Image (cartoon, grey):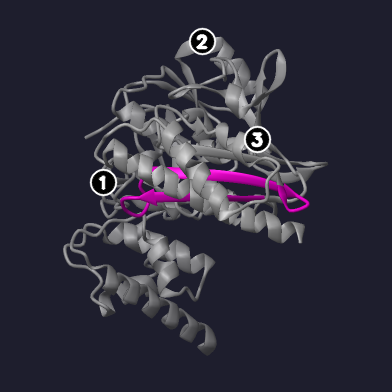
Amino acid sequence: MQTPAPCDYERATSVEGALASLAEHGPGARLIAGGHSLLPMMKLRLATPEHLIDINDLEELAYIERQGDEIRIGAMTRHVELLKSDLLAEHFPLFADAEVVIADPVVRNRGTIGGSLCQADPGEDLSAVCSAIKAEVVIRGAAGERVVSMDDFHVGPYVTAVGADEMLTEVRVKVRPGAGSAHEKVERRAGDFAIAAASAGVWVAGGTVADVGVALAAAGPFTIDVARVGELMRGKPPSEELFEQAGEIAAEDCMPMADTRGPVDYKRHLVGVLTKRALRRASERALQREA
Amino acid sequence: MQVTITINGEEVTREIEPRMLLVHFIRETPGLTGTHWGCDTSNCGACIVHVDGQAVKSCTMLAAMADGREVRTVEGLERDGVLDPIQEGFHEQHALHCGFCTPGMMMASRALLNENPDPTREEIREAISGGICRCTGYQNIVNAVRWAAAREAEVKQEA
């Protein structure tokens, strides 16, 4: 039987309360949201928090809304809401692409975007999704809020810029014209982590690529932002040839490890194919929106 | 800490360690062993129950997190001695062999029909994809959920 080690529990009723409790209990305290990463880790003693602060009652952090030229997603928004959101489907369809293959519907009822990002598992899809569309995250602490890019947010495997007495409260994505996006994933069986996955965001203006982002999950020790694809594609009209070249770049720049999901050469090949497919689909969507 | 969880309409209060998982609370305190404890890693789905109307895996939720909430287990499907159409469907379509996955499959299916009373076979497969049946009886489980959907539509029409 797997049971977590002993710990204390409290239920937060406000963000301020949760932050105050984090500060009071020090590094032994952890926030728990959906719990689908933290509880399994606690059972395996990979995490041994002394004090759990349950933030499931913080409805104030469960929203997907448009504010000016941004879409803002509260950290407690569940996977199921990301999957069903009309606003995201309209502007960033890669969320639905990813969500339909993240775990299973019952897990998606509990897991949250904030929890997924803060877990910073290199195999997790939403980190790649948010990197590809150049999202920013809002981190709140006692001293106030700061907004950081996904690049600065990801410090390393399972490590983010969120301090011990801080919490991630929101994800923000700029709504820009001519946007298209897609997420492509190959998994061994329904609901599994990816063998490899690629997210793409493409913004077109006048038929050429104004901006592009590609990020990879399960392709290295952390979420990989393939910056070189930007240099390749910006200023050119999207084409099969470009997608092919971008795939080659991604296959070179990824850092996969051999494991039960496959050897390195296979994963590199897969990353190339998935990058090509994601860019193709994202570009089609972008051109459709511009038309 | 003391928690009070309403399980199938009855309040259950108990002093627990905060680390106790909901699945163990359900099985130990009111002794409702219909909810199965399987893989312990949220992969197999044998422990699926409804919390405030939503299907969740009770091995990956602390009992403390369910304090003050409403839980429905497989035992709560039956009402006043009348089986839920999902239960009838599993019986009629022979949707179980060893029965270990059955409570979770039923609760996932019940949650689906509550939201989507006329699901396609594909939608049913997606809804139960968080459960594993090692007797490989998925075809009949899908048949059972279709059977229950048709039965509920029939009952609605009669009413």
**Which is more N-terminal, label 2 or label 3?**
2
Q: Is residue A192 magenta?
A: yes
Q: Nearer the viewer, mark 3 or mark 2?
A: 3
Q: Chain of mark 1?
A: B
At label 3, the amino acid type is Ala
The residue that appears at 38% across and 32% down in the rendered structure is A39
Q: Name the quarter where the C terminus of chain A is drawn.
A: bottom right
**Cα–Cα gap, marks 3 and 2:** 29 Å
Q: Nearer the viewer, residue B140 or A181?
A: A181
| Helix, strand or loop at mark 2 | helix
Q: Position of residue B20 (x, y in %)?
A: 34, 32
| Mark carried by residue B37 | 1
In the image, is B153 to the left or to the right of A270?
right
Task: Check chain identity for marks 3 and 2: say if they share one.
Answer: yes
Q: Which residue is mark 3?
A: A135
The residue that appears at 51% across and 10% down in the rendered structure is A26
**Cα–Cα gap, marks 1 and 2:** 34 Å
Q: Nearer the viewer, mark 3 or mark 1?
A: 3
At label 2, the amino acid type is Gly
The crowding category of the residue bearing disc 3, from other C-alpha atoms within 10 Å (few below 14, some 14 to 19, many at least 20), is many
The residue that appears at 36% across and 49% down in the rendered structure is A187
Q: Which residue is mark 2?
A: A26
| Mark carried by residue A204 | none
The residue that appears at 38% across and 60% down in the rendered structure is B107
At label 1, the amino acid type is Trp
Q: Nearer the viewer, residue A211 or B55?
A: A211
**Cα–Cα gap, marks 3 and 1:** 39 Å
Q: Nearer the viewer, residue A250 or B51?
A: A250
Report the magenta residues as a range.
A180-208
Q: Nearer the viewer, residue A64 or A188?
A: A188
Q: Position of residue A60 (x, y in %)?
A: 68, 37
Q: Nearer the viewer, mark 1 or mark 2?
A: 2
